[in-house]
Image: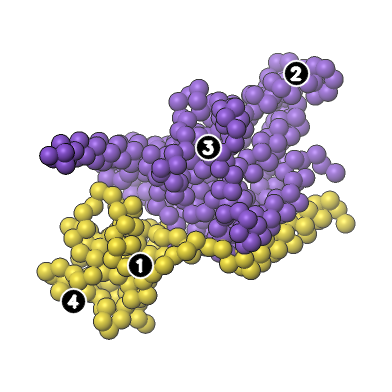
Chain colours: A yellow, B purple
Amino acid sequence: MTWAQIIQIVSVAGVVAMIAAAWWAKIPRPTPELDPARARDLLAVEFPDNPINDLWIASDGAGAVARSGTEALVVYRAGDGYVARSLSWADALIAPVQSGHVRFRFGDFAAPRASLAVSGINPWPPQGHQAGLAA
Amino acid sequence: MKLDPVTLAIPFFIISILLEILLSRLGVTKANYEVRDTATSLMMGFFSSIIGAIPAAAIFGVSVWVYKYRLLDIPMVGLLGVGAWAALFLLEDLTYYWFHRLSHERRFWWAAHVNHHTSQHYNLSTALRQTWTGGVSGTWLLWLPLSFIGFPPAMVAIQKGISLVYQYWIHTEVIRRLPGPIEAVFNTPSHHRVHHARNPRYLDANYAGILIIWDRLFGTFIPEDDAEPCRYGTVKNLGDFNLLRVAFHEWIGIGQDLARSRSPREVLGYLFGPPGWSPDGSRDTSHTLKAKWQARQAAQAQASAESAPMAAE
């Protein structure tokens, strides 16, 4: 067995062991469901220069959409972190709802789409979106 | 057996990450690991070692070719060798600083380096989230002058490896601050946390490899402020843990921008401007993000000053 082969075997075994350890340990950051206050805090970090006109929160608390003028600011959970992107409010309103999720597309290879859970009491587009959203 | 510091350190990488996880699980230390994030970092590192081996031989060959035309004969061993290692330590670290700064401040090289910053975590596994495209980005050219001066290519390769191994252990939140003299001279977990932070105030700072003195010298040093904890990742975090997205998203972004470019200026700007450059300034660069942050700070300070007398009344 060559030195290179030994290195590869040790590396593969190590990668498997480390992933297994991370899975076993269950020590991600806590990511409680978003409520209006948490969502606003998160949006203030991600979009500090955008005033929030209205706020909609996904039914599973794993994401939120805020209207800021003509923009829709979207934050959603990925792992134990959050991703933020924006699109036009007009495009957000016509985003398709499939299988209980509204699907936003951002045209960005780094974060091409977001899928946020909707429910009967929390539909998309939000009720009364012309006048303002009820969060 | 090759004397390659990075290869020799693989058992240390594995054991230390397992320890960081175990001790955090037991509550002895504080580190967070998310399993998909960890898997992404480790797989990026594993495939980086395989993909990187392809151009490595060619790059080393170029170094040997340049070395043939060297200015000096610098020994690796003996009394003069000790001095040569000390000189190489400094020169290689200085080279690393400029490589690293270039890799953050110009988009073409950022595309090769950004994947290292895509984790929203800062733990030892993050250190192994390494590039797949470093060879094609050509930054290895920056080390060729060392061979031209007369440092043997093997000596340069070993010193580069030592630097990489040094930079491994500073990817942790477990160590908060080291004694003052060490923080003053060396790159430490605290300094490197700032480097990985996406808070506007911390952007484009602390490019050091081993010695933080270069940042202090060239004006890119920012100390960690406990009042503003670091938030890790990139300004626009990735949407998932797809390895291909991690490795290539910025290259694809460059390609998309070049496809819609309308002038040579735009081509050059998209390729070699700062990350976030756009012809009309509609996107944010580190510079504009910092400027906006400073403006918000100033506005808050003014608002506080104006409300203070009213509160006193």
Residue type beneath disc 4: Gln
Residue B215 screen position, x and y as percent: 51, 28
Look at mark 4 in the image and give the residue it sits on. Answer: A127
Q: Do tags 4 and 2 sit on the same chain?
A: no
The numbered mark at residue B191 is 3
- Residue A69 falls left or right of residue A110: left
Q: Do tags 3 and 1 sit on the same chain?
A: no
**Label 2 neighbour load within 10 Å: few <14, some 14-19, many 20+:** some
| Residue closer to the observer: B63 or A96 | A96
**Label 1 neighbour load within 10 Å: few <14, some 14-19, many 20+:** many
Q: What separation in Å lies between label 1 and label 4 (alpha carbons)?
A: 20 Å
Label 4 sits on a secondary structure element that is loop
Residue A4 vertical position relative to residue B71 in the rendered view, above or below: below
Q: Which of marks 3 and 2 is nearer the N terminus?
A: 2
Task: Write the residue at 41% across / 42% down.
Answer: B227
Residue B149 vertical position relative to residue B59 in the rendered view, above or below: above
Q: What separation in Å lies between label 3 and label 2 (alpha carbons)?
A: 28 Å
Q: Image quarter for residue B186?
A: top right
Q: Do tags 1 and 2 sit on the same chain?
A: no
Label 3 sits on a secondary structure element that is helix
Q: What separation in Å lies between label 4 and label 2 (alpha carbons)?
A: 74 Å
Dot 2: chain letter: B
Label 1 sits on a secondary structure element that is loop
Residue B274 vertical position relative to residue B29 in the rendered view, above or below: above
Look at mark 2 in the image and give the residue it sits on. Answer: B83
Residue B61 screen position, x and y as percent: 72, 35
Residue type beneath disc 2: Gly
Q: What separation in Å lies between label 3 and label 1 (alpha carbons)?
A: 32 Å
Label 2 sits on a secondary structure element that is helix
Please state which of the two labelled residues, at mark 3 or mark 4, is closer to the viewer: 3
Look at mark 1 in the image and give the residue it sits on. Answer: A34
